[in-house]
Amino acid sequence: MRNYKLNEELYKADVEILDRYQAFSKELTRISLICIGIMGFLLKKIIFDPPTNNICLVDNFHKLSSMLYGSLFYLIISTACSIFHLYFSSDSLTHIISICRFTENKKYDKAEKEKSLRDFDFKFCSFLLLTSCSTLIFGVLLGAFFYFYFIP
């Protein structure tokens, strides 16, 4: 298989789709990292310069700081899931190319094994992408709720 030339048309569409999914995953990573920076700024502002004129914030400081920590936790989970998605989606491309090679060389049993591995990667990648999106939305909503209702 070292000297075997594979027809690029067999996997070109898969590469284009993978490229779009990875671009989306990179955007999720970028947005969640920006939000982590914003949450860090808010935590720094509250801890080192606590507002004394906002009675609601002073009285409920522990509840509100746990809200910010929860938001930070969800944003970190979102970042981790999108980075894992990038890794596993790249791994699925190796399965696709292996399937093409094994099929061309009439090694159908190995191609079936690669198909099952590819299908697992596809399902796991969709789970990671869905988790990344939902935790990003939840983390942003928690942070926005805190900011708009409790920061003067």
Image (cartoon, helix red, strand yellow):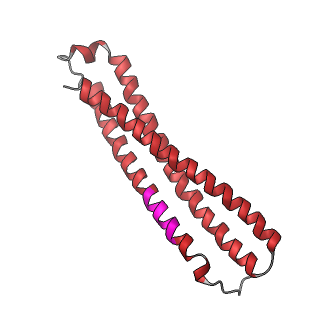
Q: Quadrant of residue 108?
A: bottom right
Residue found 72% across the figure and 64% down from its top: 115
Residue found 37% across the figure and 41% down from its top: 36
Measured as percent of width and height from the top left, residue 72 is found at: 41, 35
Measured as percent of width and height from the top left, residue 149 is found at: 25, 25
| Looking at the image, residue 131 lies above or below residue 52 | below
Measured as percent of width and height from the top left, residue 143 is found at: 34, 33
Question: Depth check: 114 or 80 in front?
Answer: 114
Q: Quadrant of the N terminus?
A: bottom right
Measured as percent of width and height from the top left, residue 16 is found at: 50, 71
Indicate yes or no whether the magenta region holds residue 23: yes
| Looking at the image, residue 97 lies above or below residue 48 | below
| Looking at the image, residue 137 lies above or below residue 113 | above
Residue 65 appears in the picture as rendered: yes
Question: Depth check: 69 or 144 in front?
Answer: 144
| Looking at the image, residue 6 lies above or below residue 130 | below
Question: Which region is colored magenta?
Answer: 16-24
Name the dominant secondary structure of the magenta segment. Answer: helix
Q: Quadrant of the C terminus?
A: top left
Q: Quadrant of residue 24?
A: bottom left
How many numbered marks, from 0 up? 0
Question: Depth check: 17 or 23 in front?
Answer: 17
Q: Is residue 43 left or right of residue 113?
A: left
Q: Is residue 95 left or right of residue 16?
A: right
